[in-house]
Image (cartoon, rainbow, N blue to C red):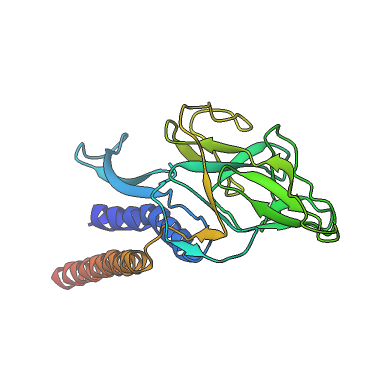
């Protein structure tokens, strides 16, 4: 009976990976541009060492490739909101200074007039540097990522001035994975490495935001299924304990 309890306990331990992935998705249902990346499954491994040759143990394995399925696009009318089209990603500077990528498009200007994400990561310009907006200027972003600024104090009809162009990359030819800071990098490549250029034009949609591609109902159902699986394994362990106690009582009575 020890094998039954051992396997049930091992299954509970391995299910933690799936629970972590599910709760992470549930926590980001309302995060702009969030992409599902975690997928997990169970596989059976043969336990090596002393014991029966039939001893097997469940083990979880997972993948962390970004699922680029688009989320719902919402029209906001805000000048600094952008939604990446198709497989486009935006280049930003992570907190450690490295190049990283994201689908998040809720931009803002910090106190120094530098364009950044709501999370604080600096948006990169076409040449890799930050995009700085002159104080008091109005900002408009075009579909190709060009950032224009207009001086409201200028007499007459103010002509927009091209400040820079947001670093956009087409990620249709590469696989992306999530970094520890939540930004993206190319699978199998060192951090800070750029995405190779393709013949496809990377574009965005101004004044809109892309929602998360997580299906809240699907995640809730998955969470309930995991909870029931956990309860089932705990019940197996409890029933195993009851059977052992009953067997011990019968042995004592017969002696």
The answer to whether one can see residue 155 in this image is yes
Near-viewer residue (249 or 202): 202
Dividing the picture into quarters, in which one does residue 155 lie?
bottom right
Q: Is residue 118 left or right of residue 217?
A: right
**Closer-to-camera residue (47/194):** 194
Please name the residue shown 58% across and 65% down the image.
Answer: 77
Horizontal and vertical percent position of residue 194: 59, 30
Q: Position of residue 100 (x, y in %)?
A: 61, 39
Is any atom of residue 178 visible in this view?
no
- Name the residue nearer the viewer: 81 or 254: 81
Numbered label tally: 0
Residue at left offset 70%, top offset 52%: 116
Write down the quadrant of residue 150 in the picture.
bottom right
Say which quarter of the image contains residue 71. bottom left
* 175 up-or-down from 117: above or below: above
Q: Kindly identify the residue that appears in the image at 37 percent across and 52 percent down.
A: 14
Give the answer, above or below, for where 249 lies relative to 114: below
Quadrant (top left, top right, bottom left, bottom right) of the C terminus: bottom left
- Judge left or right: residue 134 versus residue 21: right
Residue 4 rendering spot, x and y as whole percentages: 24, 56
């Amino acid at each position: 009976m020890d094998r039954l309890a051992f396997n049930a306990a091992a299954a509970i331990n391995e299910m933690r990976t799936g629970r972590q992935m599910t709760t992470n998705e549930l926590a980001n249902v309302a995060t702009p541009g969030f992409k599902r990346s975690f997928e997990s499954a169970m596989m059976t491994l043969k336990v090596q060492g002393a014991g029966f040759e039939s001893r097997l143990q469940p083990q979880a394995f997972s993948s962390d490739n970004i699922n680029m399925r688009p989320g719902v696009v919402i029209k906001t009318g805000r000048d600094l909101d952008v939604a990446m089209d198709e497989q486009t990603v935006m280049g930003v500077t992570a907190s450690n200074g490295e190049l990283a990528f994201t689908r998040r498009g809720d931009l803002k200007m910090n106190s120094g007039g530098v364009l950044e994400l709501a999370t604080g990561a600096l948006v990169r310009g076409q040449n890799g540097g930050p995009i700085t907006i002159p104080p008091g200027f109005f900002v408009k972003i075009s579909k190709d990522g060009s950032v224009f600024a207009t001086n409201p104090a200028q007499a007459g009809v103010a002509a927009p001035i091209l400040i820079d162009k947001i670093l956009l990359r087409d990620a249709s030819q590469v696989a992306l994975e999530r970094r520890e800071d939540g930004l993206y990098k190319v699978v199998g490549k060192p951090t800070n490495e750029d995405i190779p250029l393709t013949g496809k034009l990377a574009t965005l949609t101004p004044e809109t935001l892309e929602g998360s591609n997580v299906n809240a109902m699907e995640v809730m159902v998955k969470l309930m299924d995991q909870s029931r699986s956990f309860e089932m394994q705990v019940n197996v362990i409890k029933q195993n304990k009851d059977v052992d106690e009953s067997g011990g009582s019968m042995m004592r009575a017969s002696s």
